[in-house]
């Protein structure tokens, strides 16, 4: 009888894998998974260190023995010895099959690089995380995340790396914050997913700590977490019962047996080759992060009511002629079709209809036989994949357009695409971008992009567009009932007069805005008042976050509100007309939340977070809840710093700086919060602190264009505003600024902002010394850059500096 009970407690490996869906499964590897490939176990490594450094290992753990070795000798000697114990990564057996599946996440406490090498051998992309800085590295959208909780054998701070091997007890203490971020990510990955812990023995003390942490996470999920499985490579039925009593399923076997059971179950999930005439469908990466316009036109029904209330016009809406044609859309379509410019940017304020106009362009070109796609903006743009797609289009003599919304978020990728397309003469792929004007025009574009882009400004409705709008709402039977009471009885001209007045006063958010008989704010606030208290709280939080540039998604809302995961569907059901949820990555369990329009989000935020202190408190809560392991949350960090409605909306720069320091601590690899902090410190005339931040930035991330400019601006500010020094001292500082500017101008020869800072130094030297040489050199460099880049903003800057120079010399 006892043996029968034990048998019922465990689960066979083939049964375990039958219940697993890799896309919703997290793997957690211990040392046992690497033993078949030659790596030592934790016990073997402990004994080896003790022997090498003459330490009595009796009763001591690996961190304790390693700490004693470091104290007796030094860190470098310890790291060298540990590396000698690990052979060159030569994965064999079951670990080689792990890359054949798309896992939600892979976590490991192993130092070796067998997993990384397995992904290289199988030619599958991976993104290896060993430190907070690695979160910010660019990765392919479908790259398999591998989280190395204890660091990696090839990197330690003794070699100058940001990463450290977590060997000693001191290492554990210093890396506590990094490990917390990983366990936060693990908690999110476990939501709605299963966890398989593999590569431990039941007697391993580390496995209890791992299981304790996992079960604590699971207990907070209110039933939303999946199953937890332990796969032990040594059979121990008695200890298995202890884990089973806590709700954990136990199976026996190693990595080879686990992999064999997976293989026996059925086909793998990757490396499916296609030979269609669609270069996006042929790419495993692009197919998951790209919207096919033709499919969207045909597969989804139009919805006039949703569009009337402010949801973006879909491709189906445009194809069904539920939108009136924007003049700018016709201009863009003609430009792209003629090929006079390979890139077009449609820019304008929020609410003027950029997205609808861009989708009108795509539908027009699709009907002319083009292939048209839209990039899903929550993902990084994989420039290499798009270049490969462009090469295939060229071979097939097929024309196509890629639409990129919120293009300012992706400018570095767009720059790379432009460089490659122009250099390789790949003209069949055209790019349409939309962006807010203020977010687009001040960002640096590459020379190839600047010379090959047409920028078209979309503003409020023109008289011709108003005529088309009246015709649309008067003739379309799905829209007419929604607005007919507004202007009933008016002639065409009287309708036109009233709409002209309305469209000059308001952004074109939606038909409901234009045709409303009351102030749009009142409509939105009345809608808010009709919600239940709990739903109001979610609505105001989501609206305020979106307005501030935060990329809202389900897990972030759960962290902030504390609502149970099981209640998400109910909450979204109650908010169905005001907030939508969309897939960012089903595989990684990321689902974005959006208010139906940014202007509407701004209205809710304006009234429900009217107190500045309440907004600061929200920023604090969001920052404390951020998990930088998600790209969507790193984007939030950058947009919070960039948007005028984000951190810059806080009047007190000291408050901004406190929040910026918190962001830097959360994501030290992100440059933008550091840029903003340096700029603020200079503005506050805290020059020594600004200098310190610049040095730390360059040590951590190297020098970039903005920091090069801030070095110039800092010296200029010292010369102008340092109290109590003599004029000759100010000139000496200005000469240092000139030398710094000259060096930076040579390195960043196309950076308008660096060159403008150089001109500012030249003007100040001219004022104080009468010497015009520095200004002449700087202005010539700015002129040359503006010509090379075809940069209208650079040309404007040249004209401005010439006027100021004239004012000084007259």
Image (cartoon, rainbow, N blue to C red):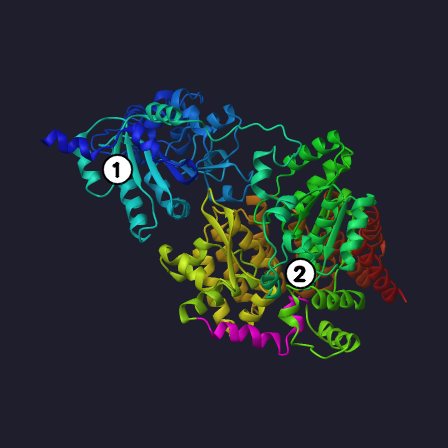
The structure residue drawn at horizontal position 75% and vertical position 38%, both measured from the top left corner, is 399
Compared across the picture, whether 613 is left or right of 173 comes to right
Instruction: Please state if 799 lies on the left or on the right of 473 as rendered.
Output: right
Residue 185 x, y percent position in the rendering: 41, 46
Q: Give the range drawn in magenta.
A: 508-531
Residue matched to label 1: 249
Would you say residue 321 is visible in this rendering? Answer: yes
Q: Is residue 733 left or right of residue 283?
A: right
Residue located 71% across and 68% down the image: 474
Distance from the alpha carbon under mark 2 to that under mark 1: 65 Å
The residue at which mark 2 appears reads as 718
Residue 520 in the magenta stretch? The answer is: yes
Query: In terms of depth relative to the viewer, which is nearer, 567 or 233?
Result: 567
Q: Quadrant of the C terminus?
A: bottom right
Label 2 or label 1, whichever comes before in sequence order:
1
In this rendering, is residue 331 above or below 698?
below
Considering only vertical position in the picture, is 250 above or below 299?
above
For this orientation, the residue located farthest to the right is 810
Q: For mark 1, does the 10 Å Cα neighbourhood hold few (<14), some (14 to 19), or many (20 or more) residues? A: many
Q: Give the overall secondary structure of the magenta segment.
A: helix
């Amino acid at each position: 009888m006892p043996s029968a009970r034990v048998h019922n407690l465990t689960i066979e490996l083939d049964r375990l894998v039958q219940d697993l869906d890799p896309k919703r499964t997290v793997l957690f590897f211990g040392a046992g998974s690497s033993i078949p490939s030659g790596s030592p176990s934790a016990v073997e490594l402990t004994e080896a260190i003790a022997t090498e450094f003459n330490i009595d290992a009796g009763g001591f753990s690996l961190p304790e023995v390693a700490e004693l070795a470091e104290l007796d000798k030094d860190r470098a000697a310890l790291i060298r010895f540990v590396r000698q114990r690990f052979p060159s990564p030569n994965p064999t057996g079951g670990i080689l099959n792990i890359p054949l599946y798309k896992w939600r996440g892979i976590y490991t406490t192993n130092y070796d690089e067998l997993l990384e090498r397995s992904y290289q051998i199988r030619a599958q992309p991976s993104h290896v995380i060993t430190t907070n800085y690695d979160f910010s590295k660019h990765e392919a959208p479908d790259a398999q995340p591998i989280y190395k909780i204890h660091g990696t054998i090839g990197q330690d701070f003794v070699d100058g790396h940001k990463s450290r091997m977590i060997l000693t007890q001191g290492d554990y203490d210093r890396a506590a914050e990094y490990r917390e971020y990983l366990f936060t990510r693990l908690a999110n990955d476990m939501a709605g997913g299963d966890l398989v812990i593999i590569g431990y023995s039941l007697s391993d003390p580390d496995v209890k700590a791992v299981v304790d942490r996992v079960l604590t996470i699971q207990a907070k999920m209110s039933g939303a977490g999946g199953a937890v499985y332990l796969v032990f490579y040594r059979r121990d039925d008695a200890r298995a019962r202890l884990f089973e009593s806590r709700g954990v399923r136990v199976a026996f076997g190693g990595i080879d047996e686990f992999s064999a059971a997976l293989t026996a179950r059925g086909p793998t999930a990757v490396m499916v080759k296609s030979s269609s005439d669609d270069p996006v469908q042929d790419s495993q990466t692009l197919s998951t992060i790209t919207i096919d316009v033709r499919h969207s036109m045909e597969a989804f029904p139009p919805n006039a009511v949703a569009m009337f209330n402010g949801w973006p016009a879909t491709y189906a809406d445009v194809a069904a002629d539920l939108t009136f044609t924007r003049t700018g859309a016709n201009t863009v379509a003609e430009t792209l079709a003629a090929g006079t410019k390979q890139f077009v940017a449609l820019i304008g304020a929020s609410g003027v209809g950029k997205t609808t106009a861009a989708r009108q362009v795509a539908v027009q070109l699709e009907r002319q036989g083009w292939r048209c796609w839209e990039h899903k903006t929550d993902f990084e743009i994989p420039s290499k994949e798009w270049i490969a797609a462009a090469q295939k289009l060229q071979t097939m003599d097929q024309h196509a357009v890629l639409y990129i919304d919120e293009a300012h978020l992706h400018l570095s990728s767009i720059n790379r695409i432009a460089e490659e397309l122009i250099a390789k003469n790949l003209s069949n792929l055209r790019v349409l971008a939309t962006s807010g004007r203020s977010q687009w025009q001040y960002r640096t574009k590459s020379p190839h992009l600047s010379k090959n882009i047409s920028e078209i400004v979309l503003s409020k409705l023109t008289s011709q567009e108003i005529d088309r709008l009246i015709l649309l709402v008067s003739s379309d039977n799905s829209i007419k009932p929604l607005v007919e009471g507004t202007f009933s009885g008016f002639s065409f001209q009287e309708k036109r007069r009233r709409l002209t007045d309305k469209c000059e006063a308001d952004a074109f958010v939606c038909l409901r805005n234009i045709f409303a008989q009351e102030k749009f704010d009142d409509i939105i606030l009345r809608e808010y008042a009709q919600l239940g208290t709990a739903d109001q709280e979610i609505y105001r939080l989501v609206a305020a976050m979106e307005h501030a540039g935060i990329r809202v998604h389900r897990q972030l809302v759960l962290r902030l509100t504390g609502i149970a995961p099981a209640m998400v569907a109910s909450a979204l059901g109650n908010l169905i007309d005001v907030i939508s949820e969309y897939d960012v990555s089903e595989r990684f369990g990321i689902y974005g939340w959006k208010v139906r329009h940014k202007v509407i989000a701004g209205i809710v935020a304006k009234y429900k977070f009217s107190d500045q202190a309440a907004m600061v408190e929200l920023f604090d809560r969001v920052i404390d809840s951020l998990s930088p392991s998600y790209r969507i949350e790193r984007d939030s960090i950058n947009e919070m710093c960039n948007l005028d409605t984000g951190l810059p909306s806080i009047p007190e720069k000291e408050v901004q700086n406190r929040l910026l320091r918190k962001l830097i601590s959360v994501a030290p690899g992100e440059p933008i919060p550091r840029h903003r902090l340096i700029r603020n410190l200079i503005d506050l005339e805290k020059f020594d602190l600004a200098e310190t931040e610049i040095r730390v930035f360059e040590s951590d991330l190297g020098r970039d264009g903005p920091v090069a400019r801030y070095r110039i601006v800092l010296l200029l500010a010292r010369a102008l505003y340092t109290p109590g020094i003599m004029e000759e001292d100010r000139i000496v500082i200005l000469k240092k600024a000139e030398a710094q500017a000259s060096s930076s101008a040579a390195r960043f020869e196309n950076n308008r902002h660096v060159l403008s800072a150089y001109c500012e130094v030249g003007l100040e030297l001219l004022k104080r010394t009468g010497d015009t040489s520095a200004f002449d050199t700087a202005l010539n460099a700015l002129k040359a850059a503006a010509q090379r880049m075809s940069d209208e903003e650079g040309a404007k800057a040249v004209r401005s500096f010439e006027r100021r120079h004239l004012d000084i010399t007259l």
